[in-house]
Image (cartoon, coloured by chain):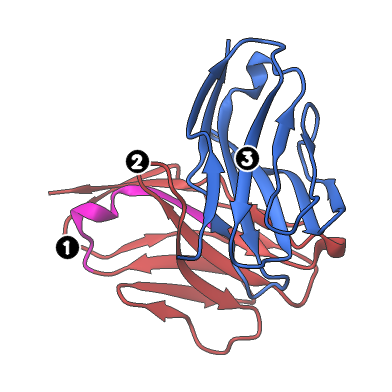
Chain colours: A red, B blue
Amino acid sequence: AQKITQTQPGMFVQEKEAVTLDCTYDTSDPSYGLFWYKQPSSGEMIFLIYQGSYDQQNATEGRYSLNFQKARKSANLVISASQLGDSAMYFCAMRAPNFGNEKLTFGTGTRLTIIP
Amino acid sequence: EAQVTQNPRYLITVTGKKLTVTCSQNMNHEYMSWYRQDPGLGLRQIYYSMNVEVTDKGDVPEGYKVSRKEKRNFPLILESPSPNQTSLYFCASSLVGTAYGYTFGSGTRLTVV
């Protein structure tokens, strides 16, 4: 079964500092995709970044990067130079073949608060 | 604009009164799915559909029904809602394949009293 674990329920970070949100995953499928989504207080789900299981390099999208350590089954999100607008809930998710249901499996999320 | 349109955004209803949450996508995606989000539990899949007339249960299907008569529409039906179905619901669509993330609807906040 697919499983995503986010061990940080909440984090407080000073503005302009970098922040790392932890994510570990478990799957027996060799091919899978890892995703991070942001959910601001308004409730919508915003895609941030994607990493494929066969990708050799860590994914980057602007201030977001994904620290992918395949052997450790880890896919941490790094936000550089945090901004007040980064305050939100962040979800790590994985998509794997999963016996034909290619669902996104989500972690329980990390609530990030940026302090001015 | 490519999007998933989900309605209504907010709904308060009484126990046992049948309701439908609509979902429509304009991206010609094969895969559509419904999730519910509850505090501390993340998002859990209710039902999914790989294509027209092909639907299957997710992790928490009890008390819900779906149909996929057209590729663009995937309504969620609660035949007899109960208070434990009070939640934030998301419809999502995507292409098939592990490299594709979901496009989410804007969510429906349902309260059953």
Mark 1 → mark 2, Cα distance in angstroms: 21 Å
Camera-near label (1 vs 3) is 3
In the current view of this chain or complex, which residue is farthest to the left? Answer: A116
State the extent of the magenta-drawn residues as a range. Answer: A81-92
- Residue B39 in view: no
Where residue A43 sits in the image (x, y, percent)? 42, 42
Q: Is residue A108 left or right of residue B98?
A: left
Q: Which chain contains the residue that carries disc 1?
A: A
- Within 10 angstroms of label 3, few (less than 14), some, or many (20 or more) residues? some
Residue depicted at x 80% and y 44%: B67
Residue depicted at x 72% and y 73%: B97
* Secondary element type, mark 1: loop
In the current view of this chain or complex, which residue is farthest to the front? Answer: B70
Give A39 or B113, whichever is nearer the viewer: B113
The residue to which callout 2 is attached is A41
Q: Quadrant of residue B30?
A: bottom right
Give the residue type at disc 2.
Ser
* Secondary element type, mark 2: loop
Where residue A73 sits in the image (x, y, percent)? 63, 69
* Badge number at residue A115: none
Where residue B107 sits in the image (x, y, percent)? 51, 41
Q: In the figure, B86 relative to B33: above or below? A: above
